[in-house]
Amino acid sequence: MNQYFKSIIDQDACSVVVCNIEHTIIYMNPAADANYKKRGGRELVGKSILECHNPHSVERIKQVIAWFAKDKNNNKVHTFFNEKQNKDVYMIALRDEEGNFIGYYEKHEYRTKDETPFYGMA
């Protein structure tokens, strides 16, 4: 089943960066690899995501993680809107089958309307 979930994330055109609760980057999809190429791209896997952020952002990340850990219903935080790229950025909790907090991921969602034709398979 894991190959299906990996394929879903790999096919996403938006960056997805997955971290464990120690803030170690454990996975980046191809879009994230390309998006963060200047910072090392896939070489960031195994490193702390906290090293990629300024002190203010590190504090905010830690606040979100504490909120995720506090309650099983605390699962999504809107962290940023990038006006230039017209996208929202979220932190989303990852939980095991019992609802225990096991990690988090950063998800980018573009607001720009997709202008490709419906069912365009060219």
Image (cartoon, rainbow, N blue to C red):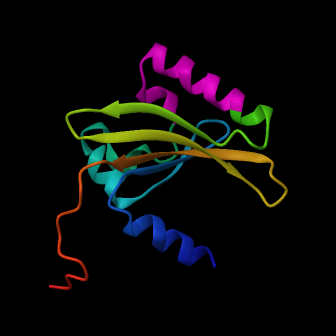
- Total count of labels: 0
Q: Quadrant of the N terminus?
A: bottom right
Q: Nearer the viewer, residue 104 or 114?
A: 114
In the rendered image, residue 90 lying in the magenta stretch gets the answer no
Q: Nearer the viewer, residue 66 or 24?
A: 66
- Where's residue 13, x and y in %? 32, 61
Q: Nearer the viewer, residue 15 or 55?
A: 15
Quadrant position of residue 76? top right
Taking the view exactly as shown, the residue that stands out farthest to the top is: 56
Q: Residue at x 20, y 85 (%)?
A: 121
Instruction: Give the left or right position of residue 103, taking residue 33 as reference.
Output: right
Quadrant position of residue 82? top left
Chief SS of the magenta region: helix
Is residue 15 depicted above or below 117 in this figure? above
In the rendered image, residue 64 lying in the magenta stretch gets the answer yes
Q: Quadrant of the C terminus?
A: bottom left
Q: Residue at x 51, y 69 (%)?
A: 6
Instruction: Give the left or right position of residue 79, taking residue 39 as reference.
Output: right
- Where's residue 32, x and y in %? 35, 51
Taking the view exactly as shown, the residue that stands out farthest to the left is: 122
Instruction: Give the left or right position of residue 69, taking residue 78 as reference.
Output: right
- Where's residue 27, x and y in %? 50, 54
- Where's residue 108, x and y in %? 39, 46
Q: Residue at x 72, y 47 (%)?
A: 102
Range drawn in magenta: 48-67
